[in-house]
Image: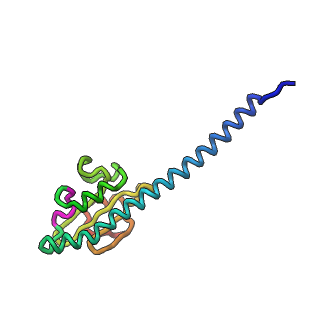
């Protein structure tokens, strides 16, 4: 009598391990993407009070608030976000996070595409609104977040 495993037993064992590995990998990826979404939401939320400070110090105007070259707070917020080139609204060298930000003299809005759902983007605006919007709306020069 021979000791050891048959070829069929080894193949079945490897198949079970492969299926379990796939399930675990999928779950881990979802948690990582949820963490990236939270990072984007947190960094964009910082822009709301920063926008008010900018407005008060810029002759009651938001003009140029979204320019990462002219506004250090926007540049700092963008630099701390995970890279998401799928949502890119600016030159990659200025905005690797793919954040869209539009400002007029009396209003601004900034949004970033979510990692967990590519059809949604997290949006904040000068009114203090923080919500999910359609990612296509994120790229359409909005200055207010609307669901």
> Would you identify the image quadrant in which residue 14 lies?
top right
> Would you identify the image quadrant in which residue 2 lies?
top right
Residue at x 46%, y 58% (from the top left corner): 34
The reply, left or right, for residue 55 in relation to residue 18 is left
Is residue 139 something that shows in the picture? no
Residue at x 37%, y 57% (from the top left corner): 113
Is residue 38 something that shows in the picture? yes
The C terminus lies in quadrant: bottom left
Considering depth in this image, is 6 or 89 the residue closer to the camera?
6
Determine whether 67 is above or below 8 in the image.
below
Considering depth in this image, is 40 or 72 the residue closer to the camera?
72
Residue most extreme to the top? 1
- Residue 81 in the image, given as x and y percentages of width and height: 35, 55
Residue at x 32%, y 62% (from the top left corner): 111
Q: Give the magenta-colored segment's residue range.
A: 63-68
Determine whether 71 is above or below 60 in the image.
above
Residue 67 inside the magenta-drawn segment? yes
Determine whether 59 is above or below 2 in the image.
below
The N terminus lies in quadrant: top right
Residue most extreme to the left? 59
User: Magenta segment, principal secondary structure?
Assistant: loop
Determine whether 60 is above or below 116 in the image.
below
Tell me which colouring the rendered structure shows.
rainbow
Considering depth in this image, is 73 or 135 the residue closer to the camera?
73
> Would you identify the image quadrant in which residue 115 lies?
bottom left
Residue at x 50%, y 55% (from the top left corner): 31
- Residue 116 in the image, given as x and y percentages of width and height: 45, 56
The reply, left or right, for residue 52 in relation to residue 130 is left
Considering depth in this image, is 72 or 65 the residue closer to the camera?
72
Residue 124 inside the magenta-drawn segment? no
The reply, left or right, for residue 46 in relation to residue 23 is left
């Amino acid at each position: 009598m021979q000791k050891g495993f048959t070829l069929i037993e080894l193949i079945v064992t490897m198949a079970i391990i492969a299926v379990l590995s796939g399930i675990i990998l999928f779950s881990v990826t979802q948690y990582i993407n949820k963490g990236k979404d939270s990072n984007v939401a947190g960094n964009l939320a910082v822009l709301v009070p920063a926008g008010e400070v900018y407005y008060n110090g810029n002759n009651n105007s938001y003009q140029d608030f979204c320019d990462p070259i002219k506004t250090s707070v926007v540049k700092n917020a963008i630099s701390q976000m995970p890279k998401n080139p799928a949502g890119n609204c600016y030159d990659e060298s200025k905005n690797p996070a793919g954040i869209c930000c539009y400002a007029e003299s009396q209003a601004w809005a900034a949004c970033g595409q979510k990692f967990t759902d590519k059809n949604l983007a997290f949006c904040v605006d000068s009114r203090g609104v923080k919500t999910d919007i359609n990612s296509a709306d994120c790229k359409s020069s909005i200055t207010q977040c609307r669901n």
